[in-house]
């Protein structure tokens, strides 16, 4: 099979197309012919050797959707021919991938496999952020950074559907249009501010009667962290869930007191899909929302498998919107 390997830690150039033997499913695994693999920011961290312990070379990617072509002897709930998706199967940038049965998400009839590949990782992230990290509800003012990104567009829609007023930040005018279509009531083009750390909280307070927001969802990290803290109202919640611009600075807990008894959390998807029931609950709600038309999954770009390096360059240069897929 053809696959994309990261030969060593580094930039997009380390991604190379290789030929590898077709994998054979172990007892609790299924073998899937990949229809589309999802590109996620975490793939770029792993490629660069950041934050996670990864060995090189490794086949990149963890998300996708496709058709089951073989099952291991202990597999009971998945059969050859099933359409499945997953958020956590190492080596997904490939024509074939092994997925543990415990990680398989059934794709309902009526959901296209490309949409199914676009949803698991970013969709379940948006879902756990608005349901379980901070339960977004009517009356909440919510600040979402990078709102036209993969997680951002889904998070904006889910927060709005739960009754919140979303204040979004985005990099460009095109991204502003997408954030508004997703339901953002207010959009701030944060790259145009003279001083993001000073001016963003001022803009947010002007939009919230001087109070600040109930919760900030911050995936940008280094560039926005201080502005996010300063945009919160008393007892607000700071959800730092990514570092697209680099790692956030160290924080003395005393500052949370001085800023108004703030809450700070740094969550990760694995801890919010820790049981099979929780994983299935989140994915089922997302697929249902797609089927009823209440959730729009924007596929902003597709790249042939061999062009994975270009897909990473696009994501890291902030030129993508919504989901980016690799097509084997
Ligand atoms: P996105 O599609 O959101 O792409 C990243 C976006 O971040 C860019 O388009 C850009 O939007 C913004 N950005 C701001 N500063 C920078 C910068 N210096 N370099 C690059 N991008 C920048 O990616 P994903 O949806 O895949 O992931 C978003 C974030 O969420 C990532 O940080 C990822 O690690 C995190 N994440 C965390 C999870 C968790 O469970 N903790 C799970 C999934 C994702 P703009 O132009 O509008 O500024």
Image (tube, grey):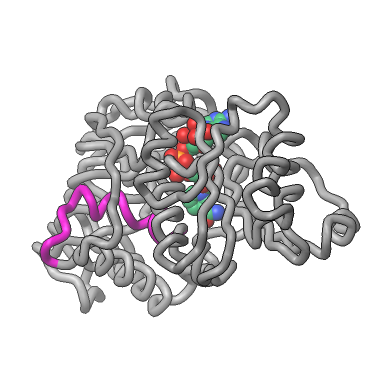
Residue 95 position in % (x across, y down):
21, 42
Q: Residue furthest front?
A: 209
Residue 63 position in % (x across, y down):
34, 50
For image coordinates 43% across by 31% down, the residue present is 315
Query: Residue 277 versus residue 151: which sits nearer the camera?
Result: 151
For image coordinates 13% across by 57% down, the residue present is 69
Q: Is residue 119 magenta?
A: yes
- Residue 296 shown left or right of residue 192 in the figure: left
Residue 289 position by quadrant: bottom left
Q: Which residues are magenta?
A: 109-125
For image coordinates 28% across by 33% down, the residue present is 301
- Residue 309 shown left or right of residue 208 in the figure: left
Q: Is residue 57 above or below residue 265?
A: above
Residue 38 position by quadrant: top left
- Residue 163 shown left or right of residue 301 in the figure: right
Q: Residue furthest top?
A: 13
């Amino acid at each position: 099979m053809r696959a994309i390997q990261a030969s060593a830690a580094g930039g997009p150039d380390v991604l190379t197309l290789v030929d590898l033997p077709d994998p054979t499913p172990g007892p609790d695994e299924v073998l899937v012919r990949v229809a589309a693999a999802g590109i996620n920011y975490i793939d770029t961290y792993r490629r660069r050797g950041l934050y996670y312990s990864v060995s090189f070379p490794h086949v990149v990617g963890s998300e996708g959707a496709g058709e089951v072509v073989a099952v291991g002897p202990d597999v009971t709930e998945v059969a050859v021919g099933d359409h499945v998706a997953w958020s956590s199967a190492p080596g997904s940038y490939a024509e074939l991938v092994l997925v543990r049965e415990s990680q398989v998400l059934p794709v309902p009839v009526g959901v296209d496999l490309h949409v199914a590949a676009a949803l698991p990782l970013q969709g379940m992230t948006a879902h756990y952020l608005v349901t379980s990290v901070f339960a977004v509800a009517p009356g909440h003012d919510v600040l979402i950074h990078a709102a036209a990104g993969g997680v951002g567009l889904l998070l904006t829609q889910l927060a709005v559907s739960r009754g919140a007023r979303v204040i979004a930040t985005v990099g460009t005018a095109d991204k502003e249009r997408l954030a508004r279509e997703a339901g953002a009531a207010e959009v701030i083009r944060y790259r145009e501010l003279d001083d993001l750390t000073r001016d963003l909280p001022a803009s947010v307070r002007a939009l919230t009667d001087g109070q600040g927001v109930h919760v900030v969802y911050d995936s940008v990290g280094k560039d926005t962290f201080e502005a996010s803290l300063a945009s919160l109202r008393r007892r607000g919640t700071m959800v730092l869930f990514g570092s697209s611009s680099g790692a956030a600075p160290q924080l003395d807990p005393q500052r949370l007191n001085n800023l108004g008894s703030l809450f700070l959390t740094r969550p990760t998807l694995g801890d919010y899909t820790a049981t099979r029931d929780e994983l299935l609950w989140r994915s089922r709600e997302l697929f249902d929302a797609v089927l009823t038309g209440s959730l729009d999954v924007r596929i902003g770009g597709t790249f042939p498998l061999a062009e994975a390096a270009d897909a990473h360059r696009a994501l890291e240069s902030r030129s993508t919107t919504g989901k980016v897929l690799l097509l084997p």
